[in-house]
Image: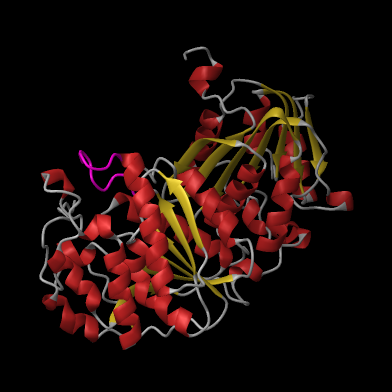
Amino acid sequence: MVTFDGRGPGTPPHVWDEPLAALPPWPLPREGRTVVVAAHPDDETLTAGGLLAELAAAGRPADVVVVSDGAASHPGSPTLDPTALARRRVDEVRAAVEILSPASDVTLLGHPDGGLCESRDRVTADLRAILTTGAPVRTLVTTWRGDAHRDHRVLAEVCADLADELGCTLAEAPLWLWHWATPDDPAVPWDDLRALPLSDHAVVVKQRAVAAHETQVQPLSDHPADVPVLHPRFLRGFDRDLEPFVVREPTRRDDGPADRASLPAAYFDATYARHADPWGFTDRPYEARKRALTLAALPDERYGRALEVGCSIGVLTAELAARCDALTGTDVADAALAAARARLAHAPHVRLVHGALGGTDDDALPGGPFDLVVLSEVGYYLSWADLTVALPDLLTRLSRGGTVLACHWRHPVEDYPLPGDAVHRALARAAQDAGLAHLVEHREADLLLDVWSRDPRSVAERTGLR
């Protein structure tokens, strides 16, 4: 684990000059909207001040979003308490961006400095709202996840997910890497680093903008807690005529997975014609374990009315039936429904019908309301466009205290329009828009499992332990 003292001089800046100068160039973004998302006030200038200046000079000013309030930079300061420090840093970031790119819109979200992990869902929701309002975002710039700073890592992970949703270029800017590492450190992402060339004008205005962050580059007082956060020697590394970024081009292109059509019912008919249990629900230990995880994640012991979307041959349905007074299972394949009916012949409270996520007319899902909706291994059969319409519609079927559980395979499948991770990002967006609380998040290499509910209480609260 990397630890460092940002107030120390760190690695001499000159040791980076030659390897950074040899980086492949990254051309200035020329199309669409660019948004710079900083973890703290001053990150926008230190990591992307030259980019902001170059875009401004090209008549394409970027939007700037600062996520945290910056109030934790001087713990124990006798000069400025956290509230006063946060106010100063707001003024500083506005002054710095005015120097770099006067026409840029600046949004300050004010999340707790040092607490972005705990605020992750709120940060994601705030950024999604900004990024999906207005012109399409083509380039998203943020901090680098490998910087050995928790806020930088969390924000980069959030922005990576959002870049996948939006299909835009992601550029992560290292900041503290240059302080704690050396060029031969294996943590340096040389293969992915690119350098944005900066004009003399951009270099000069970036220097002026760095100086505008007075609380970070000047002592607040003679007290030891008031020394500058950024050492003068470290700051010299930001005077270069280039800015390095870890650049990832969008994975969703016009011919990419997110734009492929939803799979038709005929696909599943053909699948069941080849094999009665094509996914091995009845004999694979992986599937048995996944069902156990699914049942364990349900926050209530029993449900009145439940809906399972894509019940297949009814293996999970049979286990859900033991927890429900009434259960409806749907599928688009007649062969799957026939097998499920045979398996559940002893369960008169289970109804099995033709229906699909995002279906219309004969394929429409039952109307509800349901106390539980289970969406297991079906979301990735839809295109991104169809899924993002179908999920909000599905959530309208939840009862006042209703719960939705989703579980999906994470590995790519050539036939499927979407990966499982994209399904869960889409569900998170729809659930947050619908005011649902996120109760369970289970991630492992093979699967994702999330539970959202209109009832925000934890299991302990529901069962009287709290």
Q: Does residue 93 appear in this view?
A: yes
Q: Quadrant of residue 132?
A: bottom right
Q: Is the image coloured rainbow, by chain, by secondary structure, or in one colour?
A: secondary structure
Q: In which quarter of the image is residue 414?
A: bottom right
Residue 299's place in the image compared with 361, above or below, is above
Residue 114 showing in the rendered view:
no
In the image, taking residue 414 as reference, residue 266 lies left or right, namely: right
Estimate the x, y position of residue 41 in percent, counting from the top left.
36, 57
Which residue lies at the image location 26% right of the left edge and 55% below the top edge? 215
Report the front residue among 72 and 293. 72
Residue 218 or 338: which is nearer the viewer?
A: 218
Magenta part of the chain: 70-81
Is 115 rendered above or below residue 199?
above
Residue closest to the far right: 361
Q: In which quarter of the image is residue 200?
A: bottom left
Please report the residue visible at 24 percent of the width from the left and 73 percent of the height from the top: 238
Q: Does the magenta stretch include residue 73?
A: yes
Residue 227 drawn at (x, y percent)? 15, 51
Q: Is residue 25 magenta?
A: no
Q: Nearer the viewer, residue 390 or 361?
A: 390
Query: Could you tell me residue 435's position as x and y percent?
Result: 64, 38
The dominant secondary structure in magenta is loop
Task: Tell me how many marks there are.
Answer: 0
Percent across and percent down for residue 449 are 52, 42
Q: Which residue lies furthest to the top in this view?
A: 464
Residue positioned 56% across, 55% down in the render:
128
Q: What residue is drawn where x is 62% and y is 29%? A: 319
